[in-house]
Amino acid sequence: MSRLALPLLLLVGCQSSGGGDGPVASASPSASASVAEVASGPQRLAWTAGLATLDGQPLPLKTAVVYSRGGPGLELELSTATPTCKDFSGNGRMLADGERHFSVGLAKLLDEDGKEHWGLNRIYFDGHTQQGGDLGKVTIAEADAEAGVKGELDFTLTLEKSEVMKRDAHVLVVKGPFVAKGCGVFTRDGGPAARPQPEALLTVAGKTFAVNGATVAPTTFPKPGHELVLSTGAASCKASPSDEALTLKLNLDDQGRATFAHMAGQVLPSQLNMTPGDADPSLSAKAAGPLEGDGEVSFALSGKLDLLGYEVTLGGEVTALRCPAR
């Protein structure tokens, strides 16, 4: 019986700029071959042969594809079956009988000192998602959603038995070189439109991020106030970005001071949460009008915050959509 595999990021009406995919015969890999040559040629599966074991037994992978959801990160999918690129474009896909598959989120992660390196920001297998912390290692030689990815993986995922998930205990070990065929970019249809904020300044660890979405809504967590959300991706009152480079959420008091800060995104190795003390430097967003009602309200942004090692700086002005309490 076929099963339905749901991706972590649920999209509506996706379209892909990439092509299809199918099974490829094995051949001896060439270390000097480009990712495009290997990903589209008969050498591809030789690069994934022996890449993974499950509970000590080789996992016979037949498919390795990569795609983007529109943000800066890449989704790497590996399977013992032969799904096509089109199969990954929607809200889910049917699994083949006996299929085993896992996926890995790849991105250039931002360090506290402003340097960037390729890393893992998510691992998914058998209904379990692992995020944050040290997930393992990845070395990328070439990476492109259209042309494909060539690199090496090194991680171990240990899952305990779960009665709720009806899952046995497993140990997935992935170690070695791989080449994945590029499926392109799956874009959103009917999602919120970007609202660029050219007057807003947002820097993290010295890197400037463009703000394309801003909302404000009443909140009670961690205490009553209002939550201002700034994102590199499009956002609305009904849809918040989940696959963008960076999202910064600030809980504001009556004076516009951030009493709680949350930052996440594909460029960060982990989600960051912090409650600044009353005497600590913090971020500020002073509203030019009421925060509740219809329409928009402008904020004057300022301040700096050491958010668990990442220096966050705000400046300029942002215009946010007023939203009801979430």
Image (cartoon, helix red, strand yellow):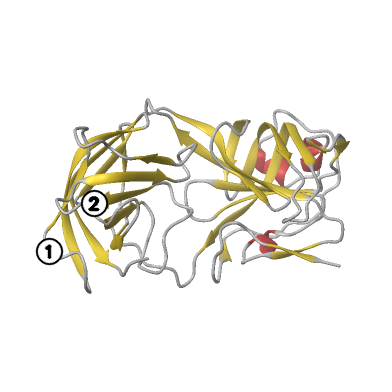
Report how far apart the C-alphas of labels 2 and 1 lie in the structure. Answer: 14 Å
Q: Residue at x 80, y 42 (%)?
A: 45
Q: Residue at x 19, y 64 (%)?
A: 291
Name the residue carrying label 2: 252
Is residue 170 shown left or right of residue 39?
Answer: right
SS for tag 1? loop
Q: Position of residue 266 (x, y in %)?
A: 48, 44
Q: Earlier in the sequence, mark 2 or mark 1?
A: 2
140 w.r.t. 12: above or below: above
The three-letter amino acid code for the residue at tag 2 is Leu
Q: Which image quadrant: the N terminus?
A: bottom right
Q: Quadrant of residue 105?
A: top right
Element carrying mark 2? strand
Does residue 289 appear in the picture of this structure? yes
| In-front residue for pair 306/314 | 306
Pinpoint residue 98: horizontal percent, then vertical percent. Answer: 87, 56
For this orientation, the residue located farthest to the left is 288
Residue topped by disc 1:
289
Number of marks present in the image shown: 2
Residue 172 vertical placement versus 76 (above, below): above
At 35% from the left and 68% from the top, the residue drawn is 237
Binning the other alpha carbons within 10 Å of mark 1 as few (below 14), some (14 to 19) or many (20 upward) gives: few
Give the quadrant of the C terminus.
Answer: bottom left
Marks 2, 1: nearer the viewer = 2
Q: Is residue 54 left or right of residue 224?
A: right
Q: Which amino acid type corresponds to the residue marked 1 in the rendered image?
A: Gly
